[in-house]
């Protein structure tokens, strides 16, 4: 209940450094006076913090201001494009990808490869991923960037605070700790400090990307409370409350795919019956759309089968259109439960679902409105829940988890700028 | 994103005062040295904070310590039993109740009355409640306690941060602001400062009581992450994450009663179909148990109809036993959705449900285990979700909301001890 450590001089200084860095990263270039005004400190209080961030190479002088005079006091500050980079990696059922994002939020390197990861062993997958990581690391090193952390997106449950994939059914992984298999990438032979490694559910990272980069089809900023739904081979969700991921006691929150939709319905691999995944998961939709396993298998690779469904639906294939309508209705029922429980401001469709939105959305929104309209009638404007929350489609689509991973890897720098510097002589606690 | 105000000297002092008061309230009597050790400050740092809380009448000297010498430096500190009191009130469908709790957590006064609040107008109900409030205030004043705040529990949706009941279907209230009707109780004629008023959903307050006083049938401390289900006339739930209530964007989170359980099932008053309330709400269970409206009406008052169901079930009435079994199954399906989404450590059955647990729990736990066992097999101990979270029964039962309301009213004092003192000369910001 107490947080005594947080109010030490050291703790306050660390938070203020983070505030300066985040202000410039989010709103820069900014003059020192503008930084001070933005974070509620005096200019005299901000100056030494800025100096420290300049020395650490996290901020740079961006040149003179429009209104100020020449020289340093009037110059503007920007985050460095040669400092730390967040490395994001994604392990998909049939692909691998790695990217690097700098403090300015720009993608500075990106590689991807097809891979046959379904029902694989972790070892070979992590070796292939390590090779991609080495490629990206070399590429950004040439531009003066150094990795600040690595976050790996996986399609499965990750035990909270660990690097262990508890269960990734589509990969066939159980209780697989990824740290040893990535040691070559995170503990380089040069004797430098180890790279912090985080392993995270892909839906959670998709939501983080949405929070950082998204804002839906209208281009507006994302709300602080939303449910993010994504679908690749399975269906996952992430719950964001007050701009924070809700992780759950064990880290398993967001298992929308196993919310019961038709309790007496189709048996599910999880042991339950009538789970959402049995109506809106990719295999279920392919089957209901009349596509044979052979036709599906002829479309490997990220998003290819989803693209096939979208093309068929656009061509007016009645079975596919009906299958997507039913998937949307099942999603709407499951999300109605989530909305009644969580009262979010928005539901965001991300991942492969974004590409199927034209055929999935109408029935989804219909069910959601029907089942979340408690108290919706006869209320003063703004007071009711009439029609439920806004449903938006992510602009990031299938890129969300990878970008979210890279941004998550950079977050430690933004939260604690100097601790996260990793010069070889600096011990890490 | 920033919290600049929180790190001012004033902010730090306020938080430290709160830490001292909470340490003594939660663990006292304590010596000054023990307080210092517990909150991570030096004894010299703690001494002036203690002096201030003593002057304000929030702490008292509890006498000499066992190990120390005589006199003040060695004496122990306790929270006062004559300082502020939290006033909790409950508006039920057929009863009203008010209680007062002191800083030691003891109930110092309590009154209740039968009331015909179903489909009532707010005015007369609030007049009757105000009379009960005056009774309790007079009673505690005679013991040297003064009201620090009033929290009112209502069976309905409350717009977040307001005193407005957006919709309470069983009362028949819509968009009803309770502040004017309670002005007599919260703005006394003596010219004193107004009493802070909070209006809150009863299920939320039941969960707060659980967090503060509960711990389930085993007597263990409640976990920081749980879903609290309560049932009176309707079914409500509260979601607690990291010991905090999840309120939702509009304050409407926790509407478990309208989670779709059988999507093609019984139409619900909310406009949806197959909502949990249609299978596990009191009217549905009474109907399914073969009890006529006349029999039900012959049992008015808090918990009377639930008591009737429990007695019939205990006597082996097959229709009632079956109805409670079906209600438990429906609760299990709805809670399986909640557990898949939120991954709590426990589900706590509170309110009237606690009294029906023997007949509801088996089918509830069966459905929950079946539908939340993703990744449950073949995992190392502790890593899986095998069987889902613990289901416990609240020891507070139907008392939860009222006690939670009184404790919530006191929370402002614990969070900000000196600001919450309400001498007539102290301006409130």
Image (cartoon, coloured by chain):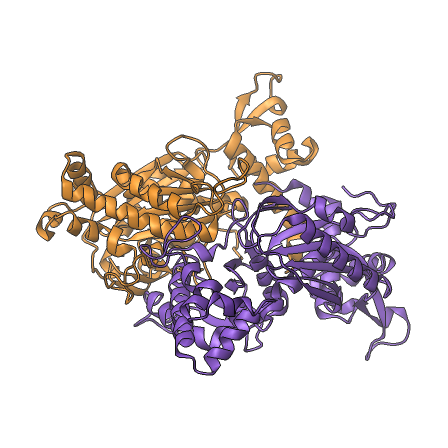
Chain colours: A purple, B orange
Q: Is residue B295 above or below residue B218?
A: below
Q: In this view, does A318 lie to the left or right of A351?
A: left
Task: Give left or right: position of A174 versus A273.
Answer: right
On screen, B98 above or below B193?
above
Q: In which quadrant is the C terminus of chain B drawn?
A: bottom right
Image quarter of residue B180: bottom left
Residue occupying image coordinates x 31% and y 59% = B181
Q: How many numbered badges does the structure rendering display? A: 0
Residue B8 appears in the picture as rendered: no
The residue at 65%/59% (across/down) is A90
Q: Where is residue B291 in the image (x, y as percent from the top left)?
A: 12, 48
**Residue reaching furthest to the bottom:** A315
Q: Is residue B25 visible?
A: yes
Position of residue A401 relative to residue B132, above or below, is below
Residue toward you, B232 or A142:
A142
**Residue B91 position in % (x across, y down):** 28, 51
Q: In this view, does B173 lie above or below A394?
A: above
Residue B30 horizontal side relative to residue B204, left or right: right
Quarter in which the N terminus of chain B is drawn: bottom right
Q: Is residue A183 left or right of residue A315?
A: right
Image point (87%, 64%), residue name: A142
Using the image as rendered, state which of residue B19 and residue A332 is in the foreground: A332
Position of residue B335 measured from the top left corner of the image (x, y, whole percent)? 37, 49
Point out the residue furthest to the front here.
Answer: A294
The picture places residue A27, in percent across and down from the top left corner, at 71, 70
Which of A351 and A343 lies nearest the eye of the viewer?
A351
């Amino acid at each position: 209940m107490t947080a005594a450590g947080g109010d030490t001089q050291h703790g306050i200084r660390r938070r203020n450094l983070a505030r300066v860095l985040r202000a410039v990263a989010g709103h820069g270039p900014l003059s020192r006076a503008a930084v001070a005004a933005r974070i509620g400190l005096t200019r005299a209080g901000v100056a030494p913090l800025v100096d420290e961030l300049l020395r650490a190479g996290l901020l740079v002088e961006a040149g003179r201001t429009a209104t100020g005079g020449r020289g340093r006091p009037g110059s503007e500050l920007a985050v460095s494009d040669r400092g730390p980079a967040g490395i994001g990696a994604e392990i998909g059922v049939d692909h691998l990808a790695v990217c690097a994002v700098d403090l300015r939020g720009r993608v500075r390197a990106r590689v991807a490869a097809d891979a046959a990861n379904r029902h694989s062993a972790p070892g070979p997958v992590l070796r292939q991923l390590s090779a991609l990581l080495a490629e990206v690391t070399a590429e950004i090193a040439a531009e003066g960037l150094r990795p600040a952390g690595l976050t790996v997106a996986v399609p499965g449950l990750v035990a909270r605070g660990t690097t262990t994939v508890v269960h990734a059914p589509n990969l066939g992984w159980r209780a697989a700790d990824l740290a040893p298999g990535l040691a070559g990438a995170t503990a380089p032979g040069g004797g430098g400090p180890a790279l912090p490694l985080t392993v995270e559910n892909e839906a959670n990272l998709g939501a983080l990307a949405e929070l950082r980069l998204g804002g839906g089809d209208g281009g507006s900023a994302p709300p602080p409370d939303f449910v993010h739904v994504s679908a690749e081979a399975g269906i996952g969700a992430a719950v964001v409350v007050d701009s924070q991921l809700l992780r759950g006691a064990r880290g398993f929150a967001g298992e929308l795919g196993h919310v019961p939709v038709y309790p007496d319905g189709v048996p599910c691999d999880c042991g339950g019956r009538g789970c959402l995944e049995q109506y809106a998961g990719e295999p279920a939709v392919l089957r209901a759309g009349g596509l044979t396993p052979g036709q599906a298998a002829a479309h490997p690779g990220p998003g290819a089968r989803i693209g096939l469904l979208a093309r068929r639906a656009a061509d007016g294939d009645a079975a596919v259109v009906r299958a997507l309508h039913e998937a949307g209705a099942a999603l709407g029922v499951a999300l109605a439960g989530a909305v009644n429980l969580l009262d979010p401001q928005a539901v965001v469709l991300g991942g492969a679902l974004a590409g199927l939105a034209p055929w999935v959305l109408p029935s989804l929104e219909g069910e959601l409105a029907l089942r979340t309209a408690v108290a919706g009638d006869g209320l003063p404007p703004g007071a009711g829940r009439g029609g439920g929350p806004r449903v938006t489609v992510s602009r990031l689509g299938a890129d969300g988890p990878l970008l979210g991973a890279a941004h998550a890897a950079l977050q430690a720098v933004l939260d604690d700028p100097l601790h996260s510097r990793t010069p070889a002589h600096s011990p890490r606690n």
